[in-house]
Amino acid sequence: MIKGLAITPPTLGRISIGRVVEKNGKRLPEKDDQFTITSQIQNKEGWVKHPLDEQLRANAPNQKLRSIPVRMIFNDPDLNLRAEYTFFDRQTGRPVCVGDGQTCQRLTNQGVEQHPCPSPDLCPLAQGGNCKPYGRLHVNLDDSDEFGTFIFRTTGFNSIRTLAARLSYYHAASNGLLSCLPLQLTLRGKSTTQSYRQPVYYVDLTLREGVDLQSAIHTAREIDQQSKQAGFNQEALDHMARQGFANAKFEMDLEEGLDVVEELYNIEKTRQEEESFGHDLQQSLQKSVKVMN
């Protein structure tokens, strides 16, 4: 195995809750209230939709894709959801520093060094919103390719925290049979003071419609027994995946980093521009009131 090359699950496509659009000559992220499943090919209009998108959308209410049936590849929750604090160079898309809140791997002129990771709020390097939580969820959508995955990328605390909790809970409740459970991604929304009462959408992981936990666990046990009888070794699969992820200091490549910077990191910039505009507008209104008085 080539050292320094992260061996990650084969990616067949992407799952997103937004897209990149061109406005006034700039490519900016635009949030959405539904899922979109795309291939890994882009054209002038953006990412080309995967055939599964149309298939699932045909049966969705108002053709709004807000739930997607999925299967986990691994039993270990941390193999399905990869999440760290990540500092990207916004020009090149290269990861500069990756940490877990305790230690971090940082790229310097002397190579990759290990440093304490105090989290973005307390790290001098992270000031200005340059370091964010960055999560990648790998899921299987098509049984015709048992190990092929579709990847959902996010820098949102809500999605990362919710997905991490669900994966660990389902893993514990099923006695470690996470890969055998019938699950689905579900889009949820909430409003907060910070979002100016506007809905913020995040991704949750639940059992599929009409399936209760007891039935899901019973089905998972049957699938696990059938797989073992056929000679399938889930523990060995998890072990190899763990080794593959650990084969490099940084899991992300340059292309992935550039996509993340364009689609996810610019959301904060757009939000700051909107807040700045709102602040300037408020000041202008206050000045107008003073003049009138």
Image: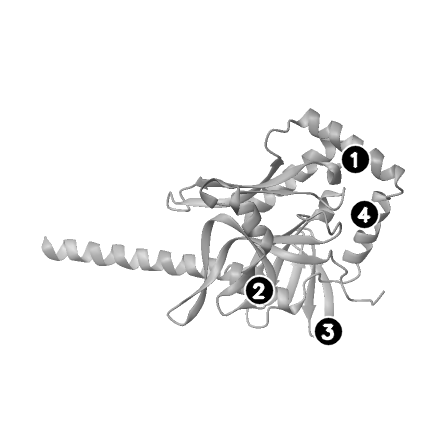
Residue 40 lies left or right of residue 232; in this view the side is left
Q: Please tell me which of labels 4 and 3 falls first in the chain.
A: 3
Q: Quadrant of residue 255?
A: bottom right
> Disc 2 or disc 3, which is closer to the eye?
2
- Real-space CA distance between mark 4 and mark 1, rounded to the nearest whole angstrom: 17 Å
Identify residue for label 3.
Answer: 110
* Kind of residue indicated by mark 4: Asp
Residue type, numbered disc 1? Ile
- Number of marks in picture: 4
Label annotation for residue 14: none
Classify residue 274 as left or right of residue 205. Answer: left
| Residue that label 4 marks | 238
The mark nearer the N terminus, 4 or 1, is: 1
Compare marks 1 and 2 and give the one earlier in the sequence: 1
Q: Nearer the viewer, mark 1 or mark 3?
A: 1
Find residue 163 and report its horizontal and vertical position in percent. Answer: 62, 42
Residue 137 % position (x, y): 65, 50
**Which mark, residue 259?**
2
Compute the Cα span from label 4 to label 3: 33 Å
The reply to whether residue 243 is in sight is yes
Tag 4's secondary structure? helix
As measured in the structure, the alpha-carbon distance from the residue carrying label 1 to the one carrying label 3 is 50 Å
Q: Secondary structure at mark 3?
A: loop
